[in-house]
Image (cartoon, rainbow, N blue to C red):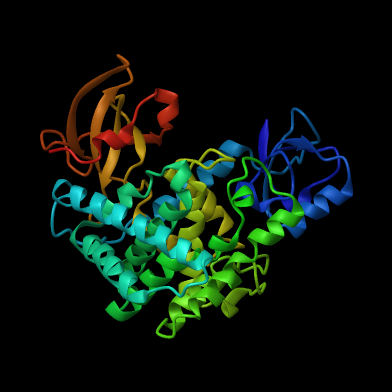
Amino acid sequence: MLKKVDASQLRVGMFIHDLDCGWMEHPFVRNRFVLTRDEEILKIMQAGIRGVTIDCARGMDVEDAPTMEEAQAATEAELTAIASKPVMPLRVTLAEEFERAVSIRRQAAGLVRTVMQDARLGKAVELDKVAPVVESITTSILRNASALLGLCVIKNKDDYTFQHSVSVCTLLVAFCRSRQMDAATVYQAGIGGLLHDTGKALIPDHILNKPGRLTDEEFAVVRKHPRDGYEILCRSPEIGEIPLDITLHHHERRDGSGYPDRQSENEISELAQMAAIVDVYDAITADRCYHKGIPAAEALRKMYEWSKFQFNPILMQEFMRCVGIYPVGTLVLLESGRLGVVVEPHESSLLTPKVNVFYSTKSQTYIKPETVDLSRGVGFGGADKIVSHESAEKWKVDPQRFLALE
């Protein structure tokens, strides 16, 4: 039996089934192992890990701890309670914006690649080239945020660093817009999101692309990238304070377990806290050379639990309202037995988005694609319900093919 426990409840003899954090954020080679020494428990605590899943069938039990199912049910109940809030109005349809968004994303990734190459050569970032790209991303978000947000889930392992920067920019701009921040702040946040990982240009490729856990020495090199990026951006005299702050502090955590300055609570600026949320969200949903990304809906649920310690809980809830409980691009199983990909959040209920259905799990065959508005009743194109979010690998389907139907 699997149970969720607090790290303070760990004892030697327990079997760790999952360390509830990002793969790169814990000091162990494996996620699953028996605790054999008190030093291992101390390592978990020092890494800032609070939630841990134990397997009571393979190690010591904690009698009063909730089972995995009970913990998940409690989380779902809390998410349902925060799932109602108006979203940004759409100016054009997803189909109208999709191809334009693909072009913008490709252009932005190319720009980040150039910025990284220039940084390695000791050149300053040319902000006059960055500005138009951020403006294009912002304008696309205003027209229909679902297009670029849906593309955030599509990444090539080989170009991850560049695409991640574009996704963080996109997510941060959408997050700022959903919180009704002024245009100047949104723009500066977008600059920060696009350039936040510039310091990674100085990380040797054999470390940055290593297909396995980093050594302590290698991880120390990686942890330098926020300050390296800050110093690179400081070479551009016209750079604003917001991009500098986001670049330097997007790895800080509210419990003080982050880096480089181990800031905590209100020491971390609001925009840096927002950047931290979108950075982690995009990172853990991506396939990397050293780990498999998790579905966006599952990532949000994990991060919601982590927000009790690492993130601002209120900002985390607002981010979930921004991208949806089932983010655009999420593969979902409907009550009818059909699979669909979420393409647009509902105006007031995040539990009833529009979904492009394309596969029958009953016959295990593709069906004629159609858009289903889950907020509508029988006879009005709806009358279905999300049962769960699903893994594309499990069903051997590619939901991204059905993001934009004509």
Q: Is residue 329 above or below residue 267?
A: above
> Residue drawn 31% across and 24% down?
337
**Quadrant in which the C terminus appears:** top left
The quarter of the displayed image where residue 92 is located? bottom left
Q: Residue at x 46, y 83 (%)?
A: 241
Residue 353 visible in image:
no
Q: Residue 340, how many percent across, how many down? A: 29, 33
Residue 349's spot in the image, x, y percent?
28, 52
Q: Residue 115, image x and y in percent?
A: 43, 65
Q: Quadrant location of residue 192? A: bottom left
Which quadrant, please, contains the N terminus? top right
Q: Position of residue 98 (x, y in %)?
A: 20, 48
Number of numbered discs visible in the structure rendering = 0
Q: Is residue 50 above or below residue 179?
A: above
- Residue at 49%, 80% (x, y): give it: 235
Foreground of the two, 78 or 386 = 386
Q: Nearer the viewer, residue 244 or 82?
A: 244
- Tell which residue pokes out farthest to the top in this image: 363
Q: Picture quarter containing residue 366? A: top left
Residue 379 can be seen in this image: yes
Residue occupying the point 25% across, 44% down: 343
